[in-house]
């Protein structure tokens, strides 16, 4: 299980970083506006353009961004759209220069400005945005309805009308919590369940899914993998997820290098593909074995790409259960 322990306000380092970005942008913008020709030469443009007013306009835009960063520093998580707009500019600017340089329209020396205006801010801005997005999802989860594990087992009903408590009464049930439907690893998980279904059910274990889709969208999704007859529980508000204490993943668990590489292999090489995010992209997956309303076994997911061998998992019930 992944615990939600970062529903905290912005870290103390974020405010001075954003204020530093604000001061830098205002000063750089003022320099360009008031001294366009001199700043062009210093920034690596040996032949000033005929219309330096265009360069001054860029300086004005950069300076205005600085005011936005200074304001955003007061509450980075609240003002994340301002930071996002600035971050997009800092991403696209160097790419635009690279295209112009390779096309022979700008000298390499002109790229120096991208180092200080853009590249050095990539890491802090991306960390602030990641933390802001995750913070809002954590706060939303806290503010939404929560129920106990016992109540959840008696409340949610599958498309066939059975609760998880009723489904597990006298039977073992493999309950698989999926991430959002666009997740390529969820598609791979369904494919593997399809391949091992007979083996799992031969072990006297039922199979059930919990997902974030509306039932109307879920039916064709599961039918595609010949799993449409299995009980599934629609949980767009992730109440069941929280009842089972399935938390939100951290950066390395969701988009770390290992996850990205496995995502490439799963989506493109193995052909499972992917789709747009529908649901909470930060929520981790889960796998449990229930019986008589109690958890007999659970799988400790390391990251979003991780999963158990489902056939072996149902056989690994700890002794004494």
Image: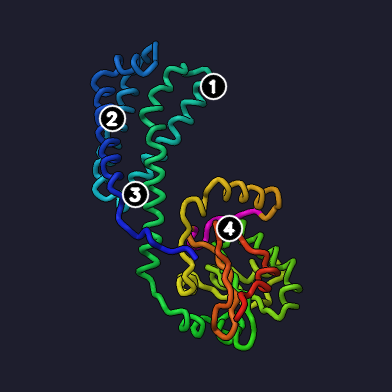
Q: Return the residue at label 2.
A: 60
Label 3, label 4: how far apart the Cα atoms are: 25 Å
Q: Return the residue at label 3.
A: 80
Q: Return the residue at label 4.
A: 183
**How far across and how far down the image is residue 227, in percent?**
69, 71
Q: Name the residue located 49 percent from the left edge and 67 percent from the top edge.
A: 246
N-term-proximal mark, 2 vs 3: 2
Categorize mark 1 by other alpha carbons within 10 Å: few (<14), some (14-19), many (20+): few
Q: Which residues are magenta?
A: 273-281
Q: Name the residue located 27 percent from the left edge and 47 percent from the top edge.
A: 12
Q: Name the residue located 37 percent from the left edge and 15 percent from the top edge.
A: 49
Label 4, label 2: how far apart the Cα atoms are: 42 Å
Q: Is residue 278 magenta?
A: yes
Categorize mark 4 by other alpha carbons within 10 Å: few (<14), some (14-19), many (20+): many
Kindly check if marks 2 and 3 are in contact, taking CB atoms under 8 A apart as contact: no
200 vs 295, left or right, is right
Would residue 161 be visible to someone looking at this image? no
Main secondary structure along the magenta-highlighted residues? loop
Numbered disc 4: secondary structure: loop
């Amino acid at each position: 299980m992944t615990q939600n322990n970062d529903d905290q306000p912005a870290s103390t380092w974020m405010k001075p970083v954003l204020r530093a970005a604000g001061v830098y942008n205002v000063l750089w913008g003022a320099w360009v506006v008031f001294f366009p020709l001199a700043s062009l030469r210093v920034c690596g443009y040996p032949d000033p353009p005929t219309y330096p007013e265009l360069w001054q306009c860029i300086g004005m835009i950069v300076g205005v961004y600085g005011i936005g960063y200074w304001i955003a520093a007061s509450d980075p998580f609240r003002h994340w759209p301002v930071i996002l707009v600035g971050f997009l500019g800092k991403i696209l600017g160097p790419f635009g220069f690279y295209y112009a340089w390779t096309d022979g329209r700008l000298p390499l020396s002109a790229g120096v400005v991208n180092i200080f205006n853009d590249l050095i801010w990539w890491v802090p801005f991306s960390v602030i945005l990641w933390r802001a997005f995750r913070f809002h999802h954590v706060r939303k989860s806290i503010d939404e309805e929560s129920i106990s594990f016992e109540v959840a087992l008696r409340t949610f009903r599958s498309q066939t009308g059975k609760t998880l408590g009723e489904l597990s009464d006298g039977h073992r049930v493999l309950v698989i919590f999926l991430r959002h439907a666009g997740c390529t690893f969820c598609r791979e998980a369904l494919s593997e369940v399809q391949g091992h279904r007979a083996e799992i059910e031969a072990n006297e274990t039922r199979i059930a899914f919990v997902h974030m889709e509306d039932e109307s969208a879920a039916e064709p999704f599961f039918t595609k993998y010949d799993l449409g007859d299995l009980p599934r529980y629609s949980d767009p508000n992730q109440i069941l997820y929280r009842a089972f204490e399935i938390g939100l993943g951290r950066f390395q668990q969701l988009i770390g290098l290992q996850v990205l590489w496995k995502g490439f292999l799963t989506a493109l090489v193995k052909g499972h593909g992917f789709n747009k995010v529908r649901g909470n992209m930060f929520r981790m997956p889960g796998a449990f074995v229930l019986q008589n309303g109690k958890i007999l076994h659970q799988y400790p997911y390391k990251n979003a790409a991780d999963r158990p061998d489902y056939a072996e998992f149902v056989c690994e019930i700890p002794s004494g259960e």
